[in-house]
Image: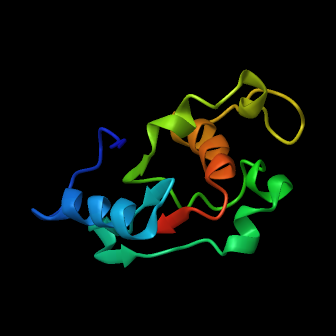
């Protein structure tokens, strides 16, 4: 699980919810909603399975980063990442935050096993 320094876990059951996602949905990657404190908004965005299978869209770092907050992945996916998996649509290494560079290949490897909780 990754948590950015400016994020926090809200509630006592957050880790239980992630465990539920792995146990019941057999997820490869899980990501959650996030709360924007300064605006009082709960933001809930998700991806369709067809969108997740579109390599060109996923590797475009300009797309809306819906997984940019609390997220996790199965460690076996991490060990499958190759350096070529860290390239953008132009064949250059991602020039972005770590979470985007890491989670694009993780989501591709997980295929239809990407779930929002």
Between residue 81 and residue 41, name the one nearer to us: 81
In the visual, does 78 lie left or right of 104? left
Q: Is residue 61 above or below residue 40?
A: above
Q: Is residue 70 above or below residue 86?
A: below
Foreground pick, 110 / 97: 110
Question: Which residue sits at x=22%, y=51%?
Answer: 8
> Does the rendering let one see residue 106?
yes
Residue 111 lies, in percent from the top left, at 67, 58
In the picture as drawn, the residue positioned furthest to the right comes out as 90
In this view, 8 is above or below 21: above
Q: Residue at x 73, y 53 (%)?
A: 62
The image quadrant that residue 46 belongs to is: bottom right
Visible in this render: residue 34? no
Residue farthest toward the top in the current orientation of the protein: 83
Q: Is residue 46 left or right of residue 24?
A: right
Which quarter shows the C terminus? bottom left
Q: Position of residue 89 (x, y in %)?
A: 86, 42
State the residue at coordinates (46%, 62%).
26
Observer-nearest of 67 and 111:
111
Q: Quadrant of residue 37?
A: bottom left
Q: x, y percentage for residue 105?
A: 66, 42
């Amino acid at each position: 699980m990754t948590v950015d320094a400016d994020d926090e876990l809200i509630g006592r059951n957050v880790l239980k919810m992630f465990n539920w996602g792995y146990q019941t949905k057999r997820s490869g990657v899980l990501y959650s909603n996030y709360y924007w404190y300064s605006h009082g908004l709960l933001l809930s965005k998700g991806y369709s399975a067809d969108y997740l299978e579109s390599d060109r869209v996923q590797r475009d770092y300009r797309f809306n980063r819906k997984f940019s907050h609390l997220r996790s992945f199965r460690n076996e996916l991490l060990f499958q990442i190759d350096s070529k998996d860290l390239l953008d649509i132009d064949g250059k290494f991602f020039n972005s935050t770590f979470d985007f560079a890491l989670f694009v290949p993780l989501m591709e490897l997980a295929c239809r096993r990407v779930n929002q909780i």
